[in-house]
Every structure is written in structure tokens, then in C-alpha cells.
Image (cartoon, helix red, strand yellow):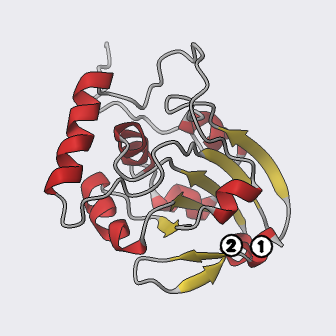
């Protein structure tokens, strides 16, 4: 039943969730909402994954948000994300997968993908909300996301449900599960001592 639920692409076209991973394995990342600074910074790092390494491993990378499809294009421009992206505006897939609502307090450590602190990140999110063309939260702010590895077909290989906004699965550990080499997410060049 989950495979038949619709998601929307950037033009509002309906695609069944199952079609996203029918032919090959897919890493599917559900984000909280498009104004969430943590999700924005996580997706900025997902954008750094070369399409060539995913193609080599026969893996698709997909982000799913829970806003209107109108927010997809601005979010991709903001993050530099060019892989597949869809929305589940009714959050039906989130619900069926058991994604949490609300935040579970835990010491999940520091994510290597989050660069902003709570204050600066929240202010950036608020600024994007009030200066954007449509003033909304671009999804339910209490909704948490998660990461799945699916396919081909109806195979489920891995499920991680985020407990709170900082509980994203480290990207390189997910890439390792699908046989993709680790990616350097550092924004500054690596120093090599000779």
C-alpha cells in the first residue's frame, strides 16, 4: 500500500512512492521541513555527493520533504541539491513509516553535517520564512524525518527514524551501506603533510 502513495515533483506531477525505487536501490532521506536549518545543511552535504559515484553503484539519492511542491525549486537553489527530490504534503508516507512527531531529547552528539548553532540557524530559518514569497513553515515543524535504503522493488534494507532535529544518520555511514565510497564534506581543502 505504501508503494502506491503519491509524492509530487517540482512541477506538481504525481509519482508513486514505489516507482522511485522500482528499478534500483535508493537512499531516501525524509527531511523535517524546508525551512529547518539542520535539514538545509544536511541537504547541502547530500548535494556534494557526485552523481557519477551513485551511478557507478546503481543507487539513486532522493530527498522527500513535506511542503508544497512550490518550495522544491527554491530549496534546491538554496542548497545546491540536484539529485531527485519530491514532497509528501499530506505527510501520509511519513505517518505510514512511523516517522516521529515532536522531539525526543537525547544527547545524539555533534553531527558532522551541521555547521550553524541553534541561535544562528534558527534566525536564518526565520529570515527565510518572512522574506520568502509564501510565508509558511514549509511543512509541519514538529515532524521528524529519517533515512531509508529501499529497492529494487519492495525491498527494505535499512530504516533510521530521526528522534530529533539533530539525529540525521551520518551520510558516509549510509553511503557505506550501499557500497559508495565516503565523501569529504569539509568545506575547506584537506591539508596534506609531505
Quarter holding residue 190: top left
**What residue is disc 2 on?**
17
Relative placement, left or right, of 93 versus 115 is right
Q: Position of residue 126 (x, y in %)?
A: 23, 42
Disc on res. 3:
1
Above or below, comparing residue 175 to residue 131 in the picture: above
- The reply, left or right, for residue 186 in relation to residue 188 is right
Q: Is residue 149 above or below residue 119?
A: below
Within-10-Å neighbours for mark 2: few <14, some 14–19, many 20+: some
Is disc 2 placed on a helix, strand or loop? helix
Quadrant including the N terminus: bottom right
**Residue shown at the point (45%, 45%) measured from the top left:** 141
Vertical order, 2 against 29 (above or below): below
128 on left or right of 8: left
Q: Nearer the viewer, residue 116 or 191?
A: 116
Q: Is residue 188 visible?
A: no
Mark sitting on residue 150:
none
Q: Nearer the viewer, residue 116 or 83?
A: 116
* 82 left or right of 5 in image: left
- Label 1: element kind: helix
Count the marks.
2
Q: Residues within 10 Å of mark 1 (few under 14, many from 20)?
A: some
Who's the residue at 40% across and 52% down the image?
Answer: 47
Residue at the image point whose x is 42% and y is 43% from the top: 39
- Whole-percent x and y of residue 172? 57, 36
Nearer-N-terminus badge (2/1): 1
Q: Residue visible at 34% across and 39% down?
A: 37
- The picture places residue 24, in percent across and down from the top left corner, at 72, 69
The answer to whether residue 51 is visible is: yes
User: Is there CB contact under 8 Å for labels 2 and 1?
Assistant: yes
Q: Quadrant of the C terminus?
A: top left
Amino acid at each position: 500500500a505504501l508503494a502506491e502513495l503519491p509524492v509530487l515533483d517540482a512541477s506538481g506531477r504525481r509519482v508513486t512512492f514505489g516507482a522511485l525505487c522500482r528499478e534500483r536501490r535508493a537512499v531516501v532521506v525524509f527531511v523535517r521541513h524546508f525551512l529547518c536549518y539542520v535539514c538545509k545543511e544536511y541537504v547541502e552535504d547530500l548535494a556534494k555527493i557526485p552523481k557519477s559515484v551513485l551511478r557507478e553503484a546503481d543507487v539513486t539519492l532522493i530527498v522527500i520533504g513535506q511542503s508544497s511542491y512550490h518550495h522544491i525549486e527554491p530549496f534546491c537553489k538554496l542548497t545546491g541539491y540536484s539529485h531527485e527530490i519530491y514532497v509528501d504534503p499530506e505527510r501520509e508516507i511519513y505517518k505510514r513509516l512511523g516517522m516521529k512527531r515532536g522531539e525526543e531529547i537525547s544527547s545524539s552528539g555533534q553531527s558532522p553535517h551541521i555547521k550553524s548553532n541553534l541561535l544562528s540557524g534558527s534566525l536564518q530559518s526565520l529570515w527565510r520564512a518572512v522574506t520568502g514569497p509564501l510565508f509558511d513553515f514549509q511543512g509541519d515543524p514538529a515532524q521528524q524525518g529519517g533515512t531509508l535504503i529501499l529497492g529494487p522493488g519492495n525491498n527494505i534494507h535499512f530504516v533510521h527514524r530521526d528522534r530529533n532535529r539533530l539525529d540525521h544518520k551520518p551520510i558516509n555511514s549510509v553511503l557505506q551501506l550501499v557500497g559508495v565510497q565516503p565523501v569529504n564534506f569539509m568545506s575547506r581543502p584537506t591539508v596534506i603533510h609531505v
